[in-house]
Amino acid sequence: MKKLKYIILSLCVIGMASCDLLENDSKSAMNDEMVFSSTQSAEQAIAGIYEVFGEQNAYRTRLVGGWVGLNTDIEFCTKAQDYAIYKMNVMGHSDLVMKDKNPWAYLTAIIERTNLCIKGIDDALASREAANNPVKGEELVHFNYLKGEAICLRSFAYYEILKLWGDAPYNFEPVDILDPNSIYKPVAPRVEIFQRLREDLKLAAELMPWSEGCPGGAKNFTGRPSKAFALGLRARINLMYAGYGLQRETNTVDYNTKDDALRAELYQEVADDCSKILEHEENKIIKYEDGGFEQVFKNICQGVTDYSQSEVIWEIPFLDGVRGQLLNRCGLRVNKDKLNAFGKLKNTDISNSSNGMVAVTPYLLNLFFESIAKDLSLSKEGVYGNYEYQKTDKRLNVTIAPYQWQYRADNNSNTVDPTKEKPLLAKYWTKASQMYLGKYRFEWLNGAYTGEDDGLNLPIMRMSEVALMLAEAMEKGATSSSYTKDYAFNLVHKRATGKDLPGEVTMVDIKRERALEFAGENLRKYDLIRWGEFDTQLKYAKNQSNYSYIEKMNFVYFEDSEYSNDPEKWPAYDVVWWAAKDARLKSSDTEKVEIGDELIVDGESVKITGVKSGASFDLGVPLLLYDCKDEELEHRQYWPFFNVITNANPKLENAYDY
């Protein structure tokens, strides 16, 4: 099995917020020359970096669900005030207050371990050179890959810190425990870290081959980075570098760099890096006719880690059934009573409910309608009554699920036992307050779900993002000798709709396309920040008419589907969203719909197996994107340094009105 086996090191992982961790990590065997004397032992040291990702309160639970990055104009957390809202004080989030184990600790622990690995590899290579026994051939390729991998993981950890806190100390060398100034550092200017990451990832891309050329278990494996991820991560960071952010010095939103020439250079690097990836790997984008967008997420749920068969460029690897809660946190909600839920029907044993925390906002539906209207050359109003939307953007029924899984009770209100009889309906509305994120689903699993730790790998970057980053850079004035802006954009749009977007692609189209493509994938908040639209878009989504789901949706119904053990017989598309104006009940023209009734849709009779009636889909709970005052929202782009962090490092000082 290619997945990394976690090497449990003999230290308690708490993070750089703890002096104990610094001492233990810096004195660990990873700093011994013997650890890096061979590629085999160096691989084990690298595996110790990955072990941190799976720790409690790191990516196993906290960062996998988005938390601070979850509530945007297109998605929100259904856990209300305990999650993802933009109202925090110096103490911080209720689930993070005064806990040693927190995301800052783990991300900085990753940085320290990568520093040790990079230095260890450099020292080992230098030692061999001095002994007239230089590393050559395949061994050198392997060592170079491992160094590039460590650089990628360090850069990713820094990228995450800058996303969450906006600032970080400059720590690119192992900590010297005898030097307090090495242990305790204030934050560095953001641009200095951006510039270092830009240079580091250029080096990593030079050291690392494409996935099919990676050594050992990293070859053709989505769980290990390759040249493509180094280039893609540099492109993503360069877009942040060239964009806006809340500035610590002035407490105002401004460009991260005011150097116009540098911004142009950054956009050109984005175009160059993304063009290189597409030139080599454009065929990774799963085509419309090959299952398209739905197949991307079926592959993720089914654990496809063959790089050539997946659209994922890099994902954080978790062992099957061990650690990782992507499905539990972000998956389609399962409401389990005392009996097994839907997964049992397909030889997957669900012995636990899922949190299903992520829902979409009404604004996202409006964005879909805007895009569909342009595709159909209709006015936005004309789309509401046009059933053609169902055949237009295939992302709609994959991304947004207006239901949760639950067994239907029989006439005596008893839950149907699927082991004894066929359920009449496997899914239906239990409440009309949410439209859940539908990208990660139990019915797409190959194996069992027996607890919260589902073991699904966490996708960090997909090929569609590379194409849209290229289009954005070219919209900002960059050039590519291999691609046009419209071609890059339509690699994504055509995969979703079967055709190119009519007319020339604009920045408005790119922003909308990123929302439709990446909802629930922890990118939107940071897109809004770098575009300078964070507070204005959240205010618009919360305070305007987008508060309610589109009023012209008279009811939601489900197509009559025969039960089957075959997962392919339960696609995302068996949900028909809303009855348009030209859809009428067979027996009457009233709006009341009951199970067993028939609708005439596009001239065809469809039997109703589940229904939610109503003139609109108002949320049953407030759409809590944020609960700070509107005028405070601009200063809530980043988390504060929580007390547990500043207590460990007194040189870290809060800003941004915290």
Image: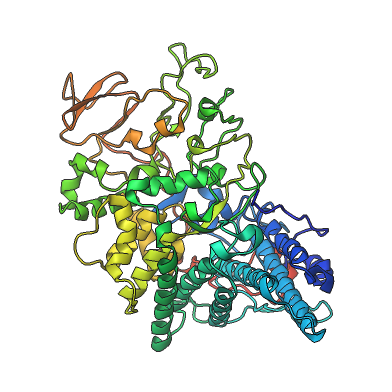
Instruction: Kindly identify the residue that appears in the image at 23 percent across and 59 percent down.
Output: 501
Instruction: Kindly identify the residue that appears in the image at 25 percent across and 38 percent down.
Output: 553
- Nearer-the-camera pick, 517 or 244: 517
Query: Which residue in the rendered view is the most extreme toward the front?
Result: 137
* Quarter containing the C terminus: bottom right
Residue 612 in view (yes/no): yes
Instruction: Kindly identify the residue that appears in the image at 25 percent across and 66 percent down.
Output: 505
- Nearer-the-camera pick, 25 or 256: 25
- In the image, is residue 329 above or below residue 192? above
- Nearer-the-camera pick, 632 or 609: 609
Residue 338 falls left or right of residue 38: left
Q: How is the image coloured?
A: rainbow
The percent position of residue 650, horizontal first and vertical second, equals 72, 74
The percent position of residue 447, horizontal first and vertical second, equals 58, 36
Residue 540 in view (yes/no): no
The percent position of residue 651, horizontal first and vertical second, equals 70, 77
- In the image, is residue 84 above or below residue 147? above
Q: Quadrant of residue 451?
A: top right
- In the image, is residue 272 above or below residue 637? below
